[in-house]
Image (spheres, rainbow, N blue to C red):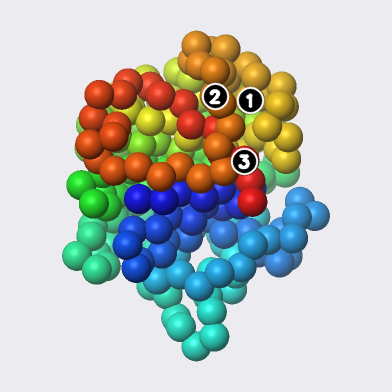
Amino acid sequence: MIITYHGKQFFKLQQGDTTYAINPLSKDNTLNIKPAKFGSDVVLSSVRHPNYDGFENATYNDKEPFRIFGPGSYEVNGNSFTGFKSVATIDGEEYINTIYFFTLEGISFCFLGDLGTPDIDQKTREYIESVDVIFVPIGGSGTLDPVQAAKVIKYFSPSVIIPMDYGKDRDSKSLETFLKETSSNGKPETKYVFKKKDIETLTGHVVVLDPE
């Protein structure tokens, strides 16, 4: 499994010959970021907003990826994806945010998206229960702040924690606070390459990815 970070909440996951794009930035994003563009087989989007729903930047030529959007159950390439409804607040406006849970190569993932509250409902917490890899926003300003994020991840006892949405600077105050709250060093990496056996003995290991 290879995980690459493209800023904000935009990730590329590569499982063999299959590529997954999560929360791709649109060309119309409000962040003045020129988004990465690559072909993918599956696209997951948490919020219907140009900062998270740039479907066009996860397509290549005539290849049409399978799109996963919103709460519900999905199956593609023999893998199951489940979305749970939550809340996001963007520029003072409330949106539906989807928390995704899925398994690839025997590795379970939880993607919190633009989660705006640390109060995750009991049904979601019981369904996910524990997870190998969790992606958590830490930037505040409508999404979880670093202290809230550190508390939320404890619900799921993750082996690996990947913070996101803390701005362009990996030395940002949000990241610094989150690393302190999780007692982590967070040495930056360009990509995270791993297999299930590599993380089986880890508990709360924070991986900081430099945006490409």
Whether pointer 3 and pointer 1 mark residues with C-beta atoms closer than 8 Å, the reply is: no
Q: Position of residue 163 (x, y in %)?
A: 53, 33
How far is mark 3 from mark 1, CA to CA?
12 Å
**Which numbered disc, 3 or 1, marks the residue closer to the eye?**
3
Looking at the image, residue 115 sits to the left or right of residue 82; the answer is: right
Amino acid type of disc 3? Asp
Give me the C-alpha separation between circle 1 and circle 2.
Answer: 9 Å
Q: Residue furthest bottom?
A: 62
To which residue does mark 1 refer? Answer: 175
**Residue at (23%, 36%) from the top-left corner?**
197
Say whether marks 2 and 3 touch (CB < 8 Å).
Answer: no
Q: Residues within 10 Å of mark 3 (few under 14, many from 20)?
A: some
Report helix, strand or loop for mark 3.
loop
Q: Which of the two residues, 42 or 199, is positioned nearer the viewer here?
A: 199
How many numbered tags mark residues here?
Answer: 3
Disc 2 marks which residue? 186
Tell which circle, 3 or 1, labels the residue nearer the N-terminal end: 1
Give the residue at mark 3: 210
- In the displayed structure, would residue 108 be above or below residue 44? above
Q: Would residue 12 be seen by someone viewing this image from the given angle?
A: yes
- Which quadrant of the figure has residue 196? top left
Please report whichever mark, 1 or 2, sits nearer to the chain's N-terminal start: 1
